[in-house]
Image (cartoon, rainbow, N blue to C red):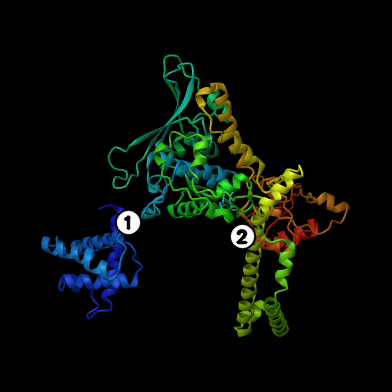
């Protein structure tokens, strides 16, 4: 019995104990050893169905099988054949019919090459999904590419939910990397990678594991797994050779001797037990970084993947320049399962032709949010005004009596709950009116757009639309344009392909030093500049105005300059952001150096750190 099966059996044992506590006598051993019968099993299964959300028949059958294994284990004997047949009829017939359990199995969502290409591009350029680090984005893409090309289960590559705390996943010891001679052109070299899948279901770390071979992909570097592994090796400093320090060294120093067919590229012994795909954790400074040892867990990857799958149709709109792709979610529905052609990327024309249900009314210039005038009209709504007046009266009364709303809430005053309900009603009403105004504006736009185009063409004035790309990180666009060219690699010179690979790795490593925190993605405009924070020396000469920049972010070299120097609109917004760093009340000796560039003041406590920032840099936290 595998470890996962033992845990499932233990779960059924705990459920059986909970059920027998309601019986007389409440002794589970008495019932399973002295009163074991089909009726006993039926009673337990009915209780389980009543207290748990069992939807599919396949899941119910699995639960019954684990319970049967538990019974056999405790009774130290197998049930008779006739007893097994009666139990089978009970599970598949009587109980499944009475509880109306779905007969269909859980259908795996189709994942086709169109989804992989566009969502990988989308995740790289811009997406609203919250990723703790830049590496997390690439790791999700690596996981999807390896699963698609090898049909591997997630638990083979990352830490499975059935084997938590074992930290067993795809590790550096499972990777073999070679620079080999091209079989058709011996003067040309290419990268080849062999990956062992030790953790296949039912054969975890047992027997001879299957080995999958990856070769270079030059049509779209963004779909090349080898490119991802090279990036992780540089980030983890995993190369055994001390001479490989930059991407160019991989091709410059691995020239194959004439008497050999390959040059092995080895990894350090110290990293071979380290998982390649790892989760995020906070370091001593309270910053989110890639965990040095802990493998990425399936639960976290599943959340990212579930969010990413909702972007399959939105990615096309984002690439087209739409500022809010979810508005057009119902216009495209791609359901063609072409997973088998992953290794042969179709042409761009055939990729676009997969969107067979694309609406001809799609227009990125259509209104995607209410106009300022429409927003003002929402505030003039009679019911909204009435609720706002009630809210204002309640708020004033609570502040007069308690001084603070927080104190009123802690004291248990019912008016505090009424105030919260009123605020929620105002928010809901405002959103409903804004959505209605946007829908009306879009309906009017599409009703008149044809006449506007005809009139403009009649006057000789062509309608033009320029998409707003100010919130898209330019470094990501550069990398995505290089990695997603969808070209015929056979018609391109080998030197150009090599240079593209080197440049791609350089841009990837540079992107890790230009991270943008998730909370700032929706606010930063990369085509604008921010004012520079004053240093201590400058503050001695002039008295600066209040600075609304985060001091911790100013000292983080791995952040994008726009994120590092972002200026908040209000002091309370800056204070809320500062709390997310979770700095300790007291710092380790000799203290925390001031994060403002050029300042070397040390603080031993958080209040002292905040006092220094207020006095010397005009940053009030």
Q: Mark 2 or 1, which is nearer the eye? A: 1
Tell me the SS state at disc 2.
Answer: loop
Work out which quarter of the rendered image holds the C terminus and state it. bottom right
Q: Classify 198 as above or below 250.
A: below
Q: CA distance from mark 2 to mark 1?
A: 45 Å
Seen from this angle, which residue lies furthest front? 458
Q: Classify 343 as above or below 494.
A: below
Tell me the SS state at disc 1.
Answer: loop
Seen from this angle, which residue lies furthest top? 258
Seen from this angle, which residue lies furthest right? 541
Residue at left offset 59%, top offset 38%: 480
**In the drawing, what numbered circle is on residue 582?**
2
Left or right side of 95 for 370: right
Q: Position of residue 356 (x, y in %)?
A: 49, 46
Left or right side of 267 for 322: right
**In the drawing, what numbered circle is on residue 105?**
1
Tag 1 or tag 2, which sits nearer the N-term?
Answer: 1
**Residue 237 visible in the displayed image:** no
Q: Position of residue 198 (x, y in %)?
A: 34, 41
Q: Position of residue 505 (x, y in %)?
A: 57, 34
């Amino acid at each position: 019995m595998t470890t996962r099966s033992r845990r499932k059996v233990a779960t059924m044992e705990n459920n059986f104990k909970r059920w027998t506590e309601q019986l007389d006598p409440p002794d589970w051993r008495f019932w399973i050893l002295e009163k074991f019968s089909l009726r006993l099993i039926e009673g337990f299964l009915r209780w389980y169905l009543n207290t748990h959300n069992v939807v599919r028949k396949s899941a119910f059958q699995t639960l019954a099988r684990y319970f049967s294994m538990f019974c056999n284990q405790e009774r130290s004997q197998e049930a008779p054949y006739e007893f097994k047949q009666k139990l089978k009829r009970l599970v598949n017939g009587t109980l499944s019919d009475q509880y109306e359990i779905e007969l269909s199995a859980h259908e795996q969502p189709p994942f086709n090459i169109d989804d992989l290409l566009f969502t990988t591009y989308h995740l790289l350029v811009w997406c609203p999904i919250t990723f703790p680090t830049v590496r997390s984005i690439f790791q999700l893409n690596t996981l999807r590419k390896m699963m698609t090309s090898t049909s591997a289960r997630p638990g083979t590559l990352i830490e499975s939910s059935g084997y938590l705390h074992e930290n067993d996943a795809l590790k550096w010891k499972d990777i073999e990397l070679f620079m080999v001679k091209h079989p058709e052109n011996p003067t040309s070299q290419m990268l080849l990678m062999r990956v062992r899948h030790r953790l296949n279901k039912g054969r975890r770390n047992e027997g001879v594991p299957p080995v999958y071979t990856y070769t270079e992909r030059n049509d779209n570097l963004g779909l090349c797994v080898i490119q991802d592994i090279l990036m992780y090796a540089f980030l983890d400093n995993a190369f055994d050779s001390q001479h490989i320090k930059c991407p160019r060294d991989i091709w410059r120093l691995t020239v194959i001797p004439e008497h050999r067919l390959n040059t092995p590229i080895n990894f350090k012994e110290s990293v071979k037990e380290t998982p390649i795909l790892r989760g995020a954790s906070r370091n001593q400074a309270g910053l989110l970084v890639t965990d040095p040892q802990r493998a990425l867990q399936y639960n976290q990857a599943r959340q990212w993947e579930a969010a990413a799958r909702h972007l399959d149709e939105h990615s096309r709109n984002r690439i087209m320049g739409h500022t809010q792709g979810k508005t057009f979610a119902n216009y495209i529905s791609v359901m063609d399962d072409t997973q088998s052609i992953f290794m042969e990327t179709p042409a761009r024309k055939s990729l676009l032709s997969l969107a067979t249900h694309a609406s001809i009314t799609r227009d990125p210039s259509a209104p995607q949010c209410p106009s300022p005038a429409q927003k003002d009209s929402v505030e003039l709504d009679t019911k909204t005004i009435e609720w706002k007046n009630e809210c204002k009266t309640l708020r004033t009364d609570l502040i007069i009596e308690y001084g603070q709303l927080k104190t009123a809430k802690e004291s248990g005053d019912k008016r505090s709950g009424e105030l919260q309900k009123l605020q929620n009603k105002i928010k809901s009403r405002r959103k409903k009116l804004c959505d209605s105004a946007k829908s009306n504006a879009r309906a009017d736009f599409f009703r008149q757009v044809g006449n506007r185009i005809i009139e403009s063409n009649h006057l000789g004035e062509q309608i033009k639309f320029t998409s707003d790309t100010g919130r898209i990180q330019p470094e990501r666009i550069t990398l995505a344009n290089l990695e997603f060219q969808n070209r015929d690699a056979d018609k391109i010179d080998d030197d150009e392909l090599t240079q593209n690979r080197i440049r791609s790795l350089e841009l990837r490593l540079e992107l890790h030093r230009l991270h943008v925190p998730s909370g700032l993605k929706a606010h930063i405009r990369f085509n604008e500049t921010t004012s520079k924070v004053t240093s201590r020396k400058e503050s001695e000469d002039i008295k600066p105005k209040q600075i609304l920049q985060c001091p911790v972010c100013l000292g983080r070299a791995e952040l994008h300059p726009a994120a590092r120097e972002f200026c908040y609109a209000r002091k309370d917004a800056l204070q809320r952001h500062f709390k997310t760093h979770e700095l300790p009340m007291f710092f380790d000796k000799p203290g925390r150096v001031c994060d403002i560039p050029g300042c070397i003041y040390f603080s031993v406590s958080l209040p002292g750190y905040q006092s220094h920032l207020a006095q010397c840099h005009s940053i009030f936290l």
